[in-house]
Image (cartoon, grey):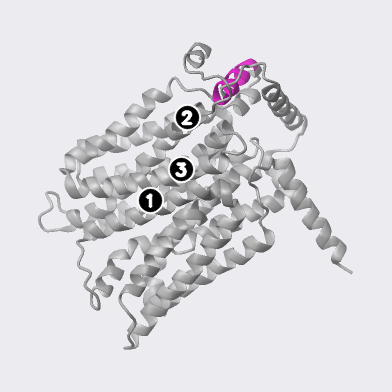
Amino acid sequence: MNIFLSKFKWQNGTRINQYLFAILITIPLLSFGMVQGWLSPMITVLKSPSSPVPFTAGDISWMTSVTYITAIVVGAPMGYLTDRYGRKFMTLATTASLILYWSIKLFSLRPWALVLARAVAGVPCSACYIVLPIYLKEISDIDLRGFMGSLLIMNRNIGYLLSYICCDLLDATLVLWIGLLVPTVTFFVFLVMPETPEFLVKQGKIEEAKSVLAWLRGVPATDPALERDIDQAVRVEKKTQADDKTAWGIILRDPTTFKAFIITLVIKITQQFDGYLIVLIYASMVFEKASESISLQLSPNKQVILIGVVQLLGSVAATCIVEKTGRKLLLVSTSLAMGVSMALLGSWFYVTSVGGWLPGWLPVLAMCACIFADAAGFQPVSYIIITDLFTFQLRGTVSSFANISAKLSNFVQMKWFTAVSELIGIHWTFAFFSIVSLFACFYSVLCFPETRHKTVDEIYQKLSKRKEEKTDSVP
């Protein structure tokens, strides 16, 4: 490994290795975006009379839901496995599951094969959102972590858009081969990439940790700042080993850590219930209703491509500004935009349902604003803060729990949205999403600490001071 690092090491403090490594780490999520993006345009094809293989409504139902069931089951031990076997090993396992997914579909496109492939997709559905953010955080300097973290959602959205365009322009079999090529190449490249310095310290491989950190920063292994950071990681690891508490023991018994955990959970769950998933699923219905009053004739594939472009633009915006605006401002502004947009969507559905008139461009604009805002801040920040708020000993545990909560939220929405909308009206459902987003906005203003360019200790000091101030204010 040291021989490999020495061949690709720039001096004078350049951090190009961090950028290149970060791009590579996020490619599995790009591949998973292709997995998810493939389903949207292909469902119409599979249900059509011209489909080479007949698919029932039950087959489609299992295809859309089984991924989340597997993701919940697999996500439970994912944090432990990441801490036990390392970030690199689990990323390789994630990439291997993506190779298996595309291979199954190339072998057969019958219902049983697609359902099995979608079940396998549950592995990257959890792992990409647990392992990759941790990996990214631990190879990034403190002033690059927001930018690097936002690459996750940007690459996923590139995967979405790539699938939409390929399914529209290329033969179905060729699309599957492209899907297989991406994780296969990534897997073999990743075999020669290093583990994170913090995990190497945890394993007691101090010298290798120094070599990797020097390679990432483009500095000599004797650099004073590098030595200081490695020594700090060693002290944290020794303190953790001396503490007989488990990860959950630390989270539940330490007041400041528990407060950080609650903040993470609230933001993660509210982001899942901000309605973006439903907007993506029901975008075609919005386009159809809007076309009744404006000249908006787009094929279903062109509709999803437009949505993919909006998503990608939002994630590009997040990547460009997250280190300038900070996490808090981005989270507050995008959750507010989500709340207002959902309220507009709900209002449009209500007014049109009672015979009133509102311009057809309004729901399209509100829908695009929802998707843009979620991709531009609400979604990427919900992943970045997990790595910002916790030490490397706790990140896997917290990420696993947050991921399970997110997948349960997704499953509930996928399973019950139609039934609830028919019961109370789709406008009230969107009103609920608006309330959730606005609650997240005000909660973030009051409780969320800015984490940009701050260490975990500095963030916890701020959280502790807030708690002391509240205690002092009680008569």
The residue positioned 34% from the left and 44% from the top of the image is 159
| First-in-chain label (3 vs 2) | 2
The residue positioned 65% from the left and 42% from the top of the image is 453
Q: Are marks 3 and 2 in contact (CB under 8 Å)?
A: no
Span highlighted in magenta in the image: 207-217
For this orientation, the residue located farthest to the top is 3
User: Which mark, by number, is residue 312?
Assistant: 1
Q: Is residue 115 visible?
A: no
User: Which mark, by number, is residue 21?
Assistant: 2
User: Which mark, by number, is residue 152?
Assistant: 3
Three-letter code, disc 1:
Leu
Cα–Cα gap, marks 2 and 1: 21 Å
| First-in-chain label (1 vs 3) | 3
Label 2 packing within 10 angstroms: few (<14), some (14-19), many (20+) = some
Three-letter code, disc 2:
Phe
> x%, y% of residue 285?
28, 69
For this orientation, the residue located farthest to the bottom is 355
